[in-house]
Image (spheres, grey):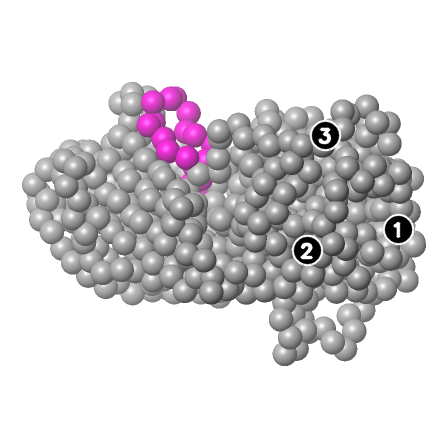
Amino acid sequence: MRFEKINYTIVIVTSILLFGCKDNITSKQNTEIEKDTSYTAYTNPVMWADVPDMSITRKDDTFYLISTTMHLMPGAPVMTSKDLVHWEIASYVFDSLTDTPKYNLKEGTVYGRGQWASSIRYHNGEFYVLFSPNDEPFKSYFYKSKDPKTGNWELISRMKHFHDASLFFDDDGKVYAFYGTGELTELKPDLSGVMPGGIDIKIFERDSTETGLLEGSQVVKHNGKYYLLMISWPRGEPRRQLCYRADNITGPYEKKVILESEFAGFYYAGQGAIIDDVNGNWHALIFQDRNGVGRVPLLMPVTWEDGWPMLGDEFGKVPLHDTIPLKPHDTGRHIVESDEFNSDKLKINWQWNHNPINNAWSLIERPGYLRLKTNRVVDNLYLAPNTLTQRMEGPTSTGIVSLNLSGMKDGDRAGFAAFNGDSGILRISNEEGKKTLRMVTNVVALDPNTKAVTNVEEDIKESVEINEDIIYLKIEGDFNVDKDIAKFYYSLDNKKWTQIGPEFKMIFDWRRLFMGTKFAIFNYATKTSGGYIDVDYFHYERHPENLVPFQ
């Protein structure tokens, strides 16, 4: 059954009495933290941007979330919130990965690979992260930090590959990784390796209703029972969120569907995590595929029914609007932000496409500007080093860049893109001293094994000759239901804007980049390296008022 909405004060008191201590928080900590009976209203998705494969932990009244960013560097973003509604980026677990030259866009690429579904846990005063790149050499990474807000993450160890893993610290001091489709491996307590002679088994086999992998393992322990959350794609049925439950960590496990819900005209939601708050209430963040913008987090209540964590509202559906019984906490920082480039450090919101070449960009050579220098001759955007990205957001959002082109060399190409496997691009080409702005589309083909770029299909939609060294470029994205449309504009005075080229249809393709579309600033050489552009600013606006209600 599902309960009607009732007074949260009763819920809070009852939850504390019945449920006691929760995952990674001791009973003593719960009693020492001041209880909060305020409310925060929210509308789903709470982050209308590409934040997939969420894992969550908590220290006191602060939540920590980690997500997947694959080939983008720095990687493994850790976000913080006190109300599960307002999120900001605290740090990245690593600056770069160096397992293969492909991370440097050499001998292939890591598009759609790199850092995959991570697990974050707070335990005994430290935070721990586990992830396994979905690429050779197929080994996992373990990191730790006393405070993710400082960004001081320390690599502890590398060991066997754990697909879509959940790190778990049990009450008896033992440590495990749940991964794959019901696989369990015991680790050494210091996470230096697999425990010799420890548990290394399959805890269940999928039943006849399931097909393929059951992915996205996330584990909590509640009232002495083990709860393993996973997603499945049963044959002929929609995506759904499962829970496997057992009294012992090795099983036997029983299964229940805890969420099966489409939402707001998009696909069924599935994959994420559940977490308790300081008041004893439980909540879930589950992502939903939303085409061009990527995979977005949906917040929903968790109701414990007969010992099962049931997700969604009283009808078992994802709520469009709801309240969470926590005090609103909006710091004014967001996961996508404007940047004037007036610091000697990039804002934390930026990520490079693959590892950057650090001697080919600067914030100090011309103070107040980001200088992007060409450093390698390539023939397309997908192989261009030092392409700088931020997420695009729904329902609609706008990005504007101001570029100074005076340092471009013959053959250089610079501009602003809605970047993905299918990209819409505003590109300025310097050809024998003449600059031309083109709105073009690119469709990349990748080798399925090495992810090497095998072909880029280009279509020039419109061209305009440019006689100025300063140009302003604008991209508008609309991610409402059945939209996923980008529009492109330019200006020479930042006042009069002219649309260039047609509307561009943004898509999501897991076979190639496996990410939502990103704003991307780029500059690359096709003939001789050494040219540069100066980026004066990136101005960004999200437009929540442009939401088109689903009918």
Q: CA distance from mark 3 to mark 1?
A: 27 Å
Q: Nearer the viewer, residue 354 or 516?
A: 516
Q: Give 395 or 77, whichever is nearer the viewer.
A: 395
Q: Amino acid at mark 2?
A: Gly
In the rendered image, residue 313, in percent from the top left (x then y), is placed at 68, 55
- Seen in the picture, residue 538 relative to 43 is either above or below; the reply is above
The secondary structure that dominates the magenta segment is loop
Tag 2's secondary structure?
A: loop
Q: Disc 3 designates what residue? A: 36
Residue 420 pos. (x, y %): 39, 55
Which residue is at 14% across, 41% downward? 496
Disc 2 from disc 1: Cα separation: 21 Å
Task: Tell me where residue 462 appears, x and y as whole percent.
Answer: 16, 58
Kind of element beneath mark 1: strand
Say which label, 3 or 2, has the lower sequence index: 3
Give the mark nearer the N terminus: 3 vs 1.
3
- Residue under label 1, please give it: 225
* Among the 4 quarters of the image, the one containing residue 345: top left
Give the amino acid type for the residue marked by disc 1 in the picture.
Lys
Q: Are marks 2 and 1 in contact (CB under 8 Å)?
A: no
Quarter of the picture holding the N terminus: bottom right
Q: CA distance from mark 3 to mark 2?
A: 22 Å
Residue drawn at the location 56% of the way across and 57% of the way down:
288
Question: For mark 2, what is the residue?
Answer: 312
Q: Was residue 170 drawn as part of the magenta stretch in this picture?
A: no
Q: Is residue 191 visible?
A: no
| Element class at badge 3 | loop
Q: Which residues are magenta?
A: 337-355
